[in-house]
Image (cartoon, coloured by chain):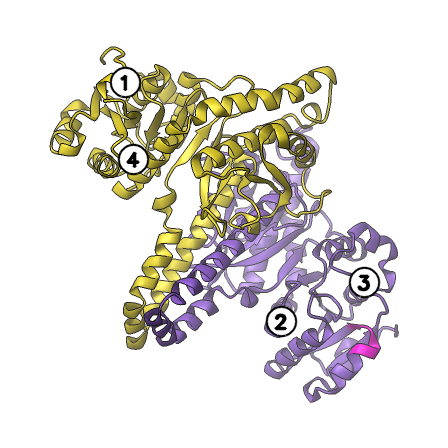
Chain colours: A yellow, B purple
């Protein structure tokens, strides 16, 4: 590994993204193809690419658009999709994933992108980047196709941790709102708390405690709290950010993806049934394309890890070049907006009174009684 | 209210379903229209219909197919969709919902059907029918369109209670498997436990405890346990019954419904875009109908309350005549199969060793350590 060059020098003033070449099911050629797409569209983007130099150097050398915009960092090891996070923490020092995060930790790149093993990436990111001051649990935020004006809602946590207490949920609200402002350009995001009903007395105790904390932090957090929302509201236009624990969020995300896949399979079967319906499908080709574009998971490819000293974008393991490029675009947008600095400022301002109160009143419902619930 | 006539006498040996005429958003005319549909198709079905006699008697009298097959029970009160369950428990004695459950309690009807307020219906059913011996928490089971051979999977709990410990989850597995056998005709259902990953060490502690209990009860319960499943597996062909707590299940159900609605809206918009795509949509009419039929929520209309001394089918509040008729069909099927008796026998056999063990070993993981988690 080389020293610490000034990124703005080596890359001509561009915004540098640190990219794991070896993660993902499709291998480094797909990752490099994604880099090429982004570099072609976006003159301001540059990369540090981590992986086996013997494999990735020829791939990069072949693409003229990457010349002078893609530094290669050799890393001999690769984190596999089925490696246990605990293993990677102990023995992963030589991996491309480790090296990718290292460049963010050292300040050489603003954001890290990897298609690799989510559990290992989160564990390594926690270890190397560390949590932001005052954050109890980092979260993974995803984008959800919606009826709203920007076409997507933010949901978090979708799987960083299976638990979240009231104070964690408040932090998710703050982080999600900040992400919606900087990543999606929503000036004052509307935040909803996921529950089994919209009445105030519904759901689990930590949710009732969280709703008060989230309501109280509206102004410091620069968002509007719309109260409880239900599963059916996740893609709705009445909310921009959906807050939930990582267990529920992960189940909801995969249920939504599974339902979309089921329907598109059923649709294909329905249109393949008869000669007439095949002709109809042919005529409807552009309509189908239009529909597919709106619900294409590759366009929303990129879960973002929030609550760490550095932003990490996790791309789908099966992402193709379009998917990788979508993740790079998101990473670029977050880096350029100064998201990381804004988020940590907002968190510090909003959490101070809550944590003071929790310290003063022992056993306060904000933290005490719902801890570990 | 009249006395307790022998149902098989007054209804000519038919299977009697107790129906709440006043629940639901569309009012008694829609419920009666649903009765008519079912009566036309099914000569073996009969009804006791509960509600305001002045309103429902003319509706029933007009339909010849209901003559001699629909007894009317007057109930002056109606449970509204926004009534609190606690209010209904205290003051709901004169309501059509109460009367509907009463007929099942008294043995006059085999199954109850209502489109009314879910929370109130569950609370009243718990109070009047009482839990089956050995059941800690009743559950609501729903049908989910799937790739499987019968076209539907069973998921429970989808909202009876926001919590479930390991032993509750075992009971859900037993009840769901019994429902799949008797309601869907799946000889030996495959049961999966919903989690955020399929590895054995994933998820919350009560899930890891539950997986051992559910595995151990495979033979007594007459099902195969496939282990953990994820949100994307809910509509899959590798499982017939998905077990989860009522919080997660409710969120998953509403997320799935919301996603399906979003896609069909996007689809309509995509096909309304241009002249060509409108023609295509016209040509594709039968294909669309075919697709719609497979994912039509009205066909799977009917959550079933399990774990009580009597079966209750909860139809959607917004159900139309087709929806009501689907719920009646399900109720009929469960009544004819002797589901209630089979379920209680199966539960008694499977729970005895577990509850013995929990009694012997104080603080056993089966119950002690996960209580209330």
Residue marked by disc 3? B98
Q: Are marks 1 and 2 on the same chain?
A: no
Lower position in the chain sequence, tag 1 or tag 4:
1
Q: Position of residue B321 (x, y in %)?
A: 62, 74
x, y percent for residue B231:
48, 46
First to last magenta residue range: B50-55
Who's the residue at 21% across and 26% down the image? A70
The answer to which image quadrant residue A4 occupies is: top left
Output the chain of dot 2: B
The residue carrying mark 1 is A7
Q: Nearer the viewer, mark 3 or mark 4?
A: 4
Quadrant of the image occupied by residue B102: bottom right
Q: CA distance from mark 1 to mark 3?
A: 73 Å
Task: Check chain identity for marks 3 and 4: say if they share one.
Answer: no
Q: Nearer the viewer, mark 2 or mark 3?
A: 2
Percent from the top left, x then y, of residue A106? 34, 14
Residue indicated by mark 2 = B320
């Amino acid at each position: 590994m080389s020293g610490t060059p000034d990124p703005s020098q080596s890359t001509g003033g561009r915004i540098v993204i640190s990219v794991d070449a070896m993660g993902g099911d499709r291998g480094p050629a797909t990752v490099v193809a994604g880099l090429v797409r982004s570099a072609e569209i976006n003159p301001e983007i540059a990369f540090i690419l981590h992986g086996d130099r013997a494999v990735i150097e020829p791939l990069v050398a072949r693409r003229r658009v990457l010349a002078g915009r893609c530094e290669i960092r050799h890393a001999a090891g690769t984190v596999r999709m089925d490696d246990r996070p605990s293993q990677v923490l102990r023995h992963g020092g030589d991996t491309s994933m480790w090296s990718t995060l290292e460049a963010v930790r050292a300040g050489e790149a603003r954001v890290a992108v990897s298609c690799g093993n989510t559990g290992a990436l989160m564990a390594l990111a926690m270890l190397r980047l560390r949590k932001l001051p005052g954050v109890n649990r980092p979260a993974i935020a995803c984008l959800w196709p919606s009826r709203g004006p920007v076409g997507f809602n933010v949901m978090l946590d979708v799987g960083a941790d299976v638990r979240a207490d009231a104070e964690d949920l408040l932090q998710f609200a703050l982080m999600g709102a900040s992400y919606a402002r900087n990543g999606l350009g929503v000036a004052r995001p509307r935040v909803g708390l996921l529950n089994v009903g919209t009445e105030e007395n519904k759901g689990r105790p930590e949710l009732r405690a969280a709703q008060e904390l989230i309501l109280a932090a509206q102004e410091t957090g620069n968002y509007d709290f719309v109260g409880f929302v239900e599963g059916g509201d996740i893609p709705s236009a009445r909310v921009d950010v959906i807050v939930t624990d990582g267990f529920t969020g992960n189940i909801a995300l995969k249920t939504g993806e599974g339902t979309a896949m089921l329907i598109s399979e059923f649709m294909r079967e329905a249109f393949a049934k008869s000669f007439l319906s095949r002709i109809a499908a042919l005529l409807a080709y552009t309509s189908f394309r239009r529909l597919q574009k709106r619900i294409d998971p590759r366009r929303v490819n990129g879960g973002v890890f929030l609550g760490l000293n550095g932003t990490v974008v996790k791309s789908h393991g099966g992402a193709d070049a379009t998917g990788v490029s979508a993740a790079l675009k998101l990473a670029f947008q977050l880096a350029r907006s100064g998201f990381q600095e804004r988020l940590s400022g907002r968190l510090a301002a909003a959490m101070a009174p809550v944590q003071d109160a929790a310290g003063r009143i022992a056993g306060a419902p904000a933290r005490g009684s719902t801890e570990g619930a």
